[in-house]
Image: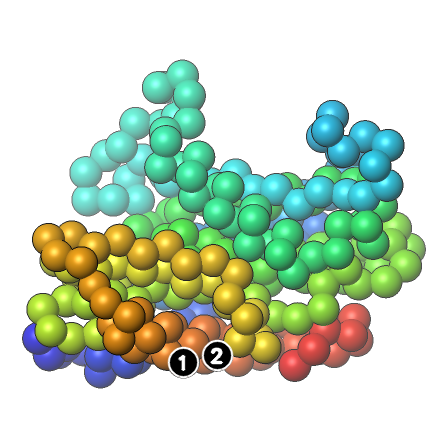
Amino acid sequence: MIRVDREVDELRPVKISVGVIKYAEGSALIELGDTKVICTASVEDKVPPFAKGAGHGWVTAEYSMLPRATPARNPRDAARGRAAGRAYEIQRLIGRALRSVTDLGALGECTITMDCDVIQADGGTRTAAITGAYVALIQALHRMLDDKRIEVCPVREYLAATSVGIVGNDYLLDLDFEEDSRARVDMNVAMTSSGRIVEIQATAEGRPFDEMDLSAMLRLAHKGISQLIEVEKQVIGEYAEAMGIKV
């Protein structure tokens, strides 16, 4: 299989816009090709019941998709009466990824909730949400430092995520929906700027993949994530440097 619009190891066009929501402590619109996700960070001076008195804060996430983010309308979660299983699984992934690079003890007893809303979906929404949420989180922490709500930045390095997969006999970076629907292996990877892995979600369809496939996809994911982190630096690099976040 040969892509007509980009090479097999190329990301879709990436754009991250910051400060897109007036009232949120941090916000970002991330666009990866035709996938668009708005991420906001909200800071509250409270923690979940399990964290009360523990001396640390919490970072969590909620994920949803607008009804016409897809070609056919999907009902809202409110109409179903509960969050869809897929949305619940994705928001847990986003929260875990962000907590992995955050020193919760440095937050004090507060909660930062990341709301990730897909306004247009063409594959890779969960990985785009992680990348966009990280950008929004850094903005919120910068504001908290300015307001002296925290003394030091709880985050020490960059974080981003991307998808990789095997379609036909090719290893592809950053799958769109059409590619994802035909992939015999679909893998999502979240990774830090130091190359440490936060999470891998990989599934084979039809037949299993081997260690050589896994290594090839991880190398491809590392390349894509490094490029995404460069985009993050363009929009929050000034904040990050002042806050002591490693390049």
Q: Quadrant of the C terminus?
A: bottom right
Q: Residue furthest front?
A: 211
Q: Is residue 146 visible?
A: no
* Tag 1: amino acid: Lys
The vertical placement of 198 against 219, above or below, is above
Residue 186's x, y, as percent?
25, 58
* Mark 1 residue element: helix
Residue 57's x, y, as percent?
77, 43
Q: Which mark is residue 226?
A: 2
Which of the two residues, 213 or 85, is positioned nearer the viewer here?
213
Residue at 37 percent of width and 40 percent of height: 65
The vertical placement of 29 against 215, above or below, is above
The residue where tag 1 is placed is 223
Q: Is residue 1 left or right of residue 142?
A: left
Which of the two residues, 245 or 210, is positioned nearer the viewer here?
210
Q: Are marks 1 and 2 in contact (CB under 8 Å)?
A: yes
Q: CA distance from mark 1 to mark 2?
A: 5 Å
- Dot 1 crowding, Cα within 10 Å, few <14, some 14–19, many 20+: some
Locate residue 214: give its quadrant. Answer: bottom left
* Mark 2 residue element: helix
Q: Which mark is residue 116?
A: none
Locate residue 85: give its quadrant. Answer: top left
Q: Is residue 61 left or right of residue 142?
A: left
Residue 28's x, y, as percent?
55, 58
Q: Is residue 236 left or right of residue 164?
A: right
Residue 211's x, y, as percent?
28, 70
Residue at 21 percent of width and 74 percent of height: 171
Residue at 22 percent of width and 83 percent of height: 7
- Dot 2 crowding, Cα within 10 Å, few <14, some 14–19, many 20+: many
* Tag 2: amino acid: Ser
Q: Is residue 219 visible?
A: yes
